[in-house]
Image (cartoon, coloured by chain):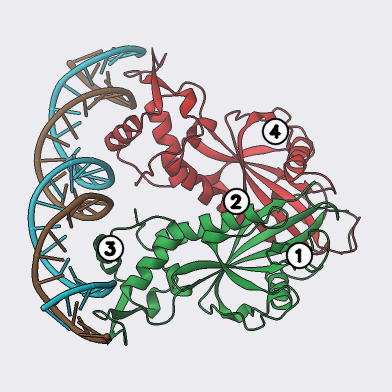
Chain colours: A green, B red, C brown, D cyan
Amino acid sequence: MSIHATPRLTVDPVVFVFRENKLRILLAKRTNDPEKGAWSIPGGHVAPNQTLLGAIELSLSTKSGVGIQSLGYIEQLYAFDTLGLDPRGHAITIAFLCLSSQSTIKNPNLPGNPEFIDIASLPQLAFDHLSIVHKGMDQLKELLLKTTAAVYLLPRYFTMADLHNLYEAALGKRLDRRNFRKKMLSLGVLDDSGNKQQGVANRPGLLYTFKSHKQNDLIKPLYF
Amino acid sequence: MSIHATPRLTVDPVVFVFRENKLRILLAKRTNDPEKGAWSIPGGHVAPNQTLLGAIELSLSTKSGVGIQSLGYIEQLYAFDTLGLDPRGHAITIAFLCLSSQSTIKNPNLPGNPEFIDIASLPQLAFDHLSIVHKGMDQLKELLLKTTAAVYLLPRYFTMADLHNLYEAALGKRLDRRNFRKKMLSLGVLDDSGNKQQGVANRPGLLYTFKSHKQNDLIKPLYF
DNA sequence: ACAAAAGTGTTTTGTGTACACCCATGC
DNA sequence: GCATGGGTGTACACAAAACACTTTTGT
């Protein structure tokens, strides 16, 4: 293919979902040595003439059953150099941030037992995968503060409390409920659907959606 | 080396300097086909067991004579997929942002005639190098708004007008001189050296430096 | 004295932040 | 009617933005 020998190239998808008011990340147990059995990001190698996204798609579906069409958002994060970390030899892995509103695993019985795990209680991870996860969390924070990326983590209809809980989980701190509502509404990216929550033992919240032409929009940066 | 065939891996350093009130980028003419003679970023291949920074260092010094020790700041930018763009076969290039306050080329007679070229009048670039340059410019803007990165582009002593000109060149827009000064001074990252400019045909400006313990600092984001 | 750029201050307007009360629902 | 979270409004402090005059140097 080439006269130049280079390190191996791999990709690692950091997939976030939001379920039960917890921000979660897709992990699977390694099925091979090294670090067989350790929780890890379900990534894989890039073949010649395969795009990076193509490699993401293949390793995701093979190792976790998550289809790329279920990801509303994909963005390249960072290239990590594994020099010295992997006994199989020098490799560079390019991490991707992926956001999905489908928060259940369709094939939980795959060899690696893929699961969406709460970022607040992460297990030990293989290799340098913890740094990769942290990079993903940092970028997700940026996105939530500067764009309407929340649309890719929430269901079509959600309450202001859902949105508030997502922001608190992702930013890792408490936000004043009233000021949060005020800021969000002032951005003009939400539509009041006119409907209310059903079957809650308290005053039901209004159900909102993101305005369709405001999805994937930059917003005035938020400061919390 | 590996049982996995992958695309070639290369690195591309986007080196910025600030000279004569112009933001400039390091370019060299390609000395080989394809696109022989076209202006390009002086990057190169990554060898197995070579770090990405090691590859940056080697290609920079070989193709442009710029030593890595002259770069006050290096940061990884983005991985670009060249699939279909390079007749030599599939390659992934990882771009790096580099900032230098040494703004003259020591070896202008190298084969590629390396030069620091004003970003306001860029020539045609080889391959997708224009996208890479744009990514570098975007990230530089971010850095200037959020950190004291200007320290890596300016000489040790500089006037408020120098700093102001750098920001205007990098952000590509006019900034109110008085509010700029006020914001910069309020950040508490500058020291007044007590000396003044010499030999200008008008009132000389005070010479400032960045406080040494505030270099590489995050600052309260600036809004211009 | 004149040109040219440096240095200084005020006012207005918007927004982040803190905080307290009423409202709708299920039980 | 009571517990639980949802929804609303006000006051204060701070910072961004717009804007005009005085000062210091070389010629």
- Give how far apart the Cα atoms at labels 1 and 3 are: 42 Å
**Could you confirm whether marks 1 and 4 are on the same chain?**
no
In contact (CB < 8 Å): disc 2 and disc 3: no
Q: Residues within 10 Å of mark 1 (few under 14, many from 20)?
A: some
**What amino acid is at disc 1?**
Gly
Task: Using the image, determine if residue B141 lies above or below residue A22.
Answer: above
Q: Residues within 10 Å of mark 4 (few under 14, many from 20)?
A: some
Q: Position of residue A107 (x, y in %)?
A: 67, 83
- Give how far apart the Cα atoms at labels 1 and 4 are: 41 Å
- Give how far apart the Cα atoms at labels 2 and 3 are: 42 Å
Task: Using the image, determine if residue A27 lies above or below residue A69.
Answer: above
**Which residue position is annotated with label 2?**
B133
**What amino acid is at disc 3?**
Arg
**Could you confirm whether marks 3 and 4 are on the same chain?**
no
Task: Say if residue B124 shows up in the picture.
Answer: no
**Which residue position is annotated with label 4?**
B68
Image quarter of residue B206: top left
Q: Which element type, helix, strand or loop, lies under badge 4?
A: helix
Tell me which label, 4 or 2, sits earlier in the chain: 4
From the image, state whether disc 1 or disc 3 is nearer to you: 1
**What amino acid is at disc 2?**
Val
Q: Residues within 10 Å of mark 2 (few under 14, many from 20)?
A: many
Image quarter of residue B174: top left
**Which residue position is annotated with label 1?**
A37
Q: Position of residue A171 (x, y in %)?
A: 43, 57
**Which residue position is annotated with label 3?**
A177
From the image, state whether disc 1 or disc 4 is nearer to you: 1
Image quarter of residue A38: bottom right
